[in-house]
Image (cartoon, helix red, strand yellow):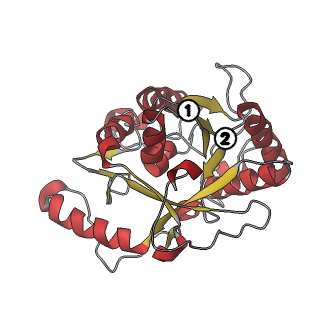
């Protein structure tokens, strides 16, 4: 049995970005842990009946999203940790930063504006306690550029670089060809009158979408998608779940294809491992 740790910035990131890998490894009997660094206080609330939580004094959205996270974790079957929380009922050390220049970014507990060494110290302590074989987090661009995602990436790298025998580090990436396939699938499967926008082949892609050869590892397991969808439904303030797809507050649909791409990264240099040929394998050496 191997032990894996997935490190994310906000509730729902775990299921959106790495739900397939998490469920795949839980199902095969591995010991899977999740470290969430904030409670997503700045999330945009989708359901009208919960709109009063967004931006409200006292951060009631944090408590609500913590409950959502617990629901998703129960479906995923992982051991859940909050960064800097010593006991189960504690708050995490940091708060959702929002975007650069926002009022939230100036908050004294904002994750992205906290000194990197301080964040990395807490991450390193958690990694040492869990002692995983593998750590998974965002790429250097944080998937789509969110400052909290980037801070988590940087903190994980720094934490691992200061450890004498660090676990293997993987970052999440998506092959460009997968995006083309997924957009074609969405055009065929999401009704035109759904009220949601289907991205066209020419629409921009996230920074984490890269040339296929850069993505050297993958977890491909379509059998876990129904459970991934169930976990996403727990995050009702943030996600609308359709039949094999989801949408966030921007009403743009994305596919749930049952596959996730990764590349191994040297935490000290930030360089990615070179491609080992056209075949892709999972996150463990035993998967090769």
Marks 1 and 2 in Cβ contact (< 8 Å): yes
Q: Between 226 and 142, which is closer to the camera in this rendering?
A: 226
Residue 208 drawn at (x, y percent): 52, 67
Q: Residue 130 appears in which quarter of the rendering?
A: top right
Within-10-Å neighbours for mark 2: few <14, some 14–19, many 20+: many
**Does dot 2 land on a helix, a strand or a loop?**
loop
Q: Give above or below for 144 relative to 112.
A: below
Give the residue displayed 26% in from the left and 63% down from the top: 197
**Does dot 1 land on a helix, a strand or a loop?**
helix
Q: Give above or below for 213 relative to 285.
A: below
- Is residue 44 at least partly visible in the picture? no
Q: Between 141 and 131, which is closer to the camera in this rendering?
A: 131
Q: CA distance from mark 1 to mark 2?
A: 9 Å
The residue under label 1 is 62
Q: How many marks?
A: 2
- Is residue 210 at least partly visible in the picture? yes
Q: Residue 266 appears in which quarter of the rendering?
A: bottom right
The residue under label 2 is 95
Name the residue furthest bottom: 202
Give the residue displayed 65% in from the left and 47% down from the top: 135
In the image: residue 141, left or right of residue 68: right
């Amino acid at each position: 049995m191997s032990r894996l740790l997935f490190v994310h910035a906000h509730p729902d990131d775990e299921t959106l970005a790495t739900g397939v890998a998490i469920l795949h490894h839980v199902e095969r009997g591995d010991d899977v842990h999740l470290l969430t660094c904030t409670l997503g206080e700045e999330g945009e609330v989708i359901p009208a009946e919960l709109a009063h939580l967004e931006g409200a004094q006292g951060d009631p959205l944090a408590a609500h999203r913590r409950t959502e996270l617990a629901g998703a974790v129960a479906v995923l079957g992982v051991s859940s940790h909050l960064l800097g929380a010593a006991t189960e009922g504690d708050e995490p050390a940091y708060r959702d930063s929002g975007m650069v220049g926002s009022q939230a970014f100036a908050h004294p507990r904002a994750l992205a504006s906290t000194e990197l060494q301080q964040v990395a110290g807490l991450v390193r302590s958690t990694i040492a306690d869990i002692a995983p074989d593998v750590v998974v987090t965002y790429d250097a661009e944080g998937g789509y550029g969110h400052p909290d995602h980037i801070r988590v990436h940087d903190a994980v790298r720094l934490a691992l670089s200061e450890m004498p025998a660090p676990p293997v580090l993987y970052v999440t990436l998506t092959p460009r060809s997968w995006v083309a396939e997924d957009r074609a699938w969405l055009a065929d499967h999401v009704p035109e009158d759904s009220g949601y926008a289907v991205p066209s082949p020419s629409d921009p892609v996230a920074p984490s979408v890269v040339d296929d050869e850069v993505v050297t590892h993958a977890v491909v397991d379509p059998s876990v998608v129904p459970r991934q969808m169930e976990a996403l439904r727990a995050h009702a303030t943030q996600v609308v779940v359709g039949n094999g797809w989801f949408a966030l507050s921007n009403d743009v649909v994305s596919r749930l294809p049952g596959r996730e791409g990764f590349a191994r990264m040297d935490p000290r240099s930030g360089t990615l491992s070179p491609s080992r040929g056209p075949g892709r394998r999972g996150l463990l050496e035993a998967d090769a």
